[in-house]
Amino acid sequence: QVHLVESGGGLVQAGGSLRLSCAASGSIASINVMGWYRQAPGKRRELVAAIRSGCSTNYADSAKGRFAISRDNAKNAVNLQMNSLKPEDTAVYYCNADIQPGAGRLYNYWGQGTQVTVSS
């Protein structure tokens, strides 16, 4: 069994910062892409940022210049540093990863989500 566990959400004022962390646990042979998605009430889930095993990254336009994604391959972890937060960043943030749990194919996993609320 593979699990993704997120932490670091919370309530912050506009202009503030939060750091989200996600750690993968279980039987893991390798991890390819790790990323963060978010879903605001009434909206579709959207990609915020992703990072590949070689550490190349991509960001949503809304996150560029404000958010930074990083990963610790030794800990099977991915982090999202969010700065200059805006009320429109309010959403449930989900960790996502493509993980090879053993010999064979990659599977896509989701964390349980962590709430980020930015007050104006």
Image: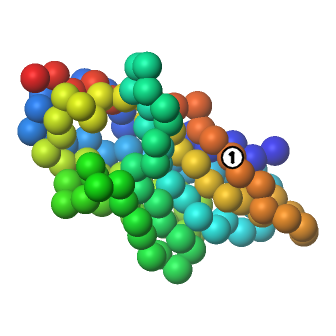
Residue 12 shows up from this direction = no
Residue at image location 11% in from the left, 32% down from the top: 14
User: What is the quadrant of residue 65 in the picture?
Assistant: bottom left
Q: Residue furthest right?
A: 103
Residue at image location 77% in from the left, 55% down from the top: 107
Residue 50 shows up from this direction = yes
Q: Count numbered badges in the picture.
A: 1
Q: In the rendering, at what x and y percent does residue 45 appear?
A: 50, 36
Residue at image location 26% in from the left, 41% down from the top: 18
Q: In the rendering, at what x and y percent does residue 93 appear?
A: 44, 36
Amino acid type of the residue tagged 1 in the rendering:
Tyr
Quadrant (top left/top right/bottom left/bottom right) for the N terminus: top right
User: What is the quadrant of residue 106 in the picture?
Assistant: bottom right
Above or below — where is 26 with respect to 14? below
Residue at image location 55% in from the left, 59% down from the top: 34
Q: In the rendering, at what x and y percent does residue 35 appear?
A: 50, 54
Read off the residue under disc 1: 109
Left of 36 or right of it: where is 99?
right
Above or below — where is 59 with respect to 2? below
Q: Residue furthest bottom?
A: 54
Above or below — where is 83 with respect to 43? below
Q: Secondary structure under badge 1? A: strand
Q: Camera-side residue: 111 or 24? A: 111
Q: Residues within 10 Å of mark 1 (few under 14, many from 20)?
A: some
Left of 17 or right of it: where is 10?
right
How is the model colour-coded?
rainbow
Quadrant (top left/top right/bottom left/bottom right) for the C terminus: top left
Q: Camera-side residue: 24 or 32? A: 32
Q: In the rendering, at what x and y percent does residue 114 appear?
A: 45, 30
